[in-house]
Amino acid sequence: MTYLLDACAVGWISVNNFNQRLFSRTTLEVSGLEGLARNDWYLVIANHQSWVDILLLQRVFNREVPFLKFFLKQQLIWVPFLGLAWWALDFPFMRRYSKSFLAKNPHLKGKDMETTKKACEKFQYKPTSIMNFVEGTRFTKEKHARQVSPFKHLLKPKAGGIAFVLNAMGGQLHHLIDVTIFYPAGTPSFWDFINGSVSKIKLHVDVKPLKDLFPEDIKVMDYFENPEQRARFQQWLNQQWQAKDQRLENWKTV
């Protein structure tokens, strides 16, 4: 059933893509798609500016990699219709306990990770792509100023999300796909995109093997228990985000 349901989702996205190519005047410039495969396991990250990002990622990666799945908060399973669809498509639902909650219920420590790992068990048998927006929210000038972000075009990246996915997947993921999304005319709304107001969008895809990605002094599996490892992993992610910020700056000045 999993293969059948994923095929339905891929077919639905293919129809959407056909409609976009037929009726939209948007030009997509995409680089770096070489070497991708539908029978591999990927962690996909990207900067996040608009709901259009999700449509773009689905369009670019459809039939290039396994159907994209998102880690979702447990509460979202109750969203009418969509919650059922996400459940049927094996989107992993995660429940994160706060420090204050665990202080009152110490017996539940580690239970959130255990539950998520169980939800991901079937992924070891079927190629999978897990999507994560590292910034945690869409970029706006207000959020950028409120964060006092050190990056010119990005919000601060959050290492916890990636660490949670890597811990939960237990080494099942083989490659990291790092996507940079750029809207030359400014961030569009969903309506701007579907009515053809967006003339051009640029995406760069950077694919790296996960086994060679982190320096030897970074142990991702110790992220949640070791403050020093958290700091090192966050520093590594900040460096990746600095390179992404520079690429966006270069595109903007062309």
Image (cartoon, helix red, strand yellow):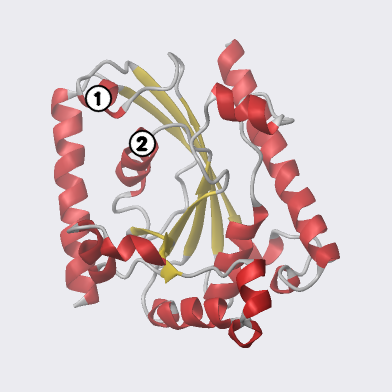
Q: Position of residue 138 (x, y in %)?
A: 48, 36
Q: Quadrant of residue 241?
A: top right
Residue shown at 70% from the left, 31% from the top? 149
Q: Nearer the viewer, residue 73 or 196?
A: 73
In this rendering, the answer to whether 179 lies above or below 23 is below
Please indicate whether residue 180 sits to the left or right of residue 2 in the image: right
Q: Quadrant of residue 6?
A: bottom left
Mark 1 secondary-structure assignment: helix
Q: Quadrant of residue 163?
A: bottom right
Please indicate whether residue 243 sits to the left or right of residue 4 in the image: right
Q: Nearer the viewer, residue 254 or 235?
A: 235
Residue shown at 21% from the left, 48% from the top? 13
State which quarter of the image contains the N terminus. Answer: bottom left
In this rendering, the answer to whether 131 lies above or below 189 is below
- Identify the amino acid type marked 1: Trp
In this rendering, the answer to whether 203 lies above or below 73 is above
In this rendering, the answer to whether 98 lies above or below 176 is below
Mark 2 secondary-structure assignment: loop
Which residue reaches farthest front?
A: 104
- Identify the amino acid type marked 2: Trp
Q: Which mark is residue 191?
A: 1
Residue shown at 36% from the left, 48% from the top? 61
Q: Residues within 10 Å of mark 1 (few under 14, many from 20)?
A: few
First reached walking from the N terminus: tag 2 or tag 1: 2
Cα distance in 3D space between marks 2 and 1: 10 Å
From the image, tell me which residue sits under label 2. Answer: 51
Asked whether residue 209 is in view, the answer is no
State which quarter of the image contains the C terminus. Answer: top right
Please indicate whether residue 243 sits to the left or right of residue 112 in the image: right
